[in-house]
Image: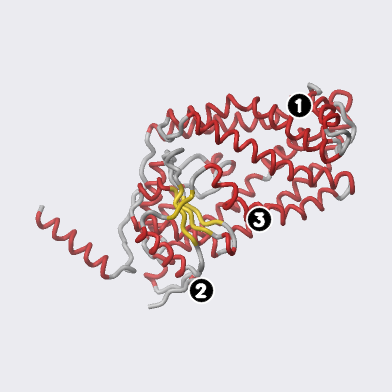
Amino acid sequence: MTCSLLIKLIVLSITCIFAQAPDISYVEVPEPTSEALSYYKSGNVLWVINFMLGFLIPLFFLFTGLSAKIRNWATRLGKNKWFLTLAFYFIIFSIISFFIELPLSYYQDFMREHAYNLSNQTFSKWFTDLINSLLVGILIGGLFISIPYFLLKKSPKRWWFYTSIIMVPFMALMMLIYPIWISPIFNDFGPMKDQVLETKILALAEECGIEGSRVFEVDKSIDTKKLNAYVTGFRDTKRIVLWDTIIEKLNEDELLSVMAHEMGHYVLGHAINGLMFMCLMMMLTFYAIYRTADSFINRYKDRIGFERFSDIASLPLLFLLMHLFLNIIGPIQLAFSRYQENAADRFGLEIRQNNYAAASAFVKLQEENLAIPRPGWLFKIFRSSHPILGDRIDFCNTYRPWEKGEPLKYGKYFNITD
């Protein structure tokens, strides 16, 4: 026992002296627990249910004539003024949809999370957040849907193209204001309690070429036991955000490895690239809607109560077709996201060169979030925005170009001084 302890102390001392020395320990991919497998299977069932509801709820609004009735109510409330009619329609539509989806939301986001011991949230906190989400959704969603409907009136044949172009600054604005004005509605963002850890995170940010950042600790344990961290915003709004849950569960090396990954997203411009890619996908989606909406309306106009796509009563049809086409191109979007995540993994490994910490962090994320390391291929193609955890752990174990004297792919971004 004494000999073993002495060896551990020697290894620890060497690690402290040579902070950049790579840890060549191999991390095994853990087998999923029975609870994780159950959570995974129930999640797949819920995904199918939500997928089907994405069709059934809009069809309900359309074929019962409810959407046309809401349009009539909104027209009277808005006194035939276009923007007021659109606003009142969207408010009424959102509230009715809220109550239709409420039972599933309660089970999916509250009951199920508590059943798997992943949530600390009280019912009052959950319901307050749900109401706040509804209000934020009405405000932002109302602004969003006003764009295509305004352009449908002005340019019936080119609305899909102009909408896609306008979406670029609109979504960029949302990315700017979301971390400052919207996220704090749901959780308290405060300074890091661990000042030493904050100093090390900021030093890592400097090494990554990120200057002038602020670090925020989120009181997320009031809601969940899951772990997360991210870097968000642009210029003066950029911030490094850590949930208090991840600070509690990960050790310092693991946490810095996670932050290196998140900083990689920022340095490599993934937010901007993702925005442009999303707008391209939206252009394809809106074009597909443009090509199909009129055929649907012409066929069912007597039942749905409107004859033009520019009629606000067509909003459920817009959502129906968006749901259809976004799911068709979904595997492309998810593949692009996985590509970016893999690049961020590579960036994090190259900047820190601590493979063991990165791999062990993924193991803890798997365990704490009840994830499984190797889900089926259908899950990967249709649901996974990140590389599967087993592959990420394997990558951490094997990617070591610096040990072979090979150039680092992202070394040009590093600002490391001896």
Q: Which mark is residue 275?
A: 3
Left or right side of 113 for 20: left
Number of the front mark, 1 or 2: 1
- The disc, 3 or 1, on the residue closer to the chain's N-terminal end is 1
Q: Could you classify mark 2 by the number of other residues whose Cα lies within 10 Å: few (under 14), some (14-19), or many (20 or more)?
A: few
Cβ atoms under marks 1 and 2 closer than 8 Å = no
Label 1: how many residues lie within 10 Å, few (<14), some (14-19) or many (20+)? many
- Left or right for 32, reference 208: left
Q: Position of residue 156 (x, y in %)?
A: 89, 45
**What amino acid type should be assigned to the residue bearing mark 1?**
Phe
SS for callout 3: helix
Residue picked out by circle 2: 412
Query: Residue 294's x, y, as percent?
Result: 87, 37
Examine the rendered structure and indicate whether residue 53 appears above or below residue 253.
Answer: above
Q: Nearer the viewer, mark 2 or mark 3?
A: 3
Residue lying at 38% horizontally and 32% vertically, measured from the top left: 34
- Say the numbered circle drawn on residue 25: none
Q: Are dots 2 and 3 in contact, CB under 8 Å?
A: no
Residue drawn at 36 percent across, 56 percent down: 194
Upstream in the sequence, badge 2 or badge 3?
3
Q: Which residue is mark 1?
A: 61
Which residue is nearer to you in this view: 340 or 79?
79
Which secondary structure, mark 2?
A: helix
The residue at the point 49 percent across, 31 percent down is 41
Please, which residue is most extreme toward the top here?
64
Between the C-alphas of marks 3 and 1, the distance is 31 Å
Q: Is residue 284 left or right of residue 232?
A: right
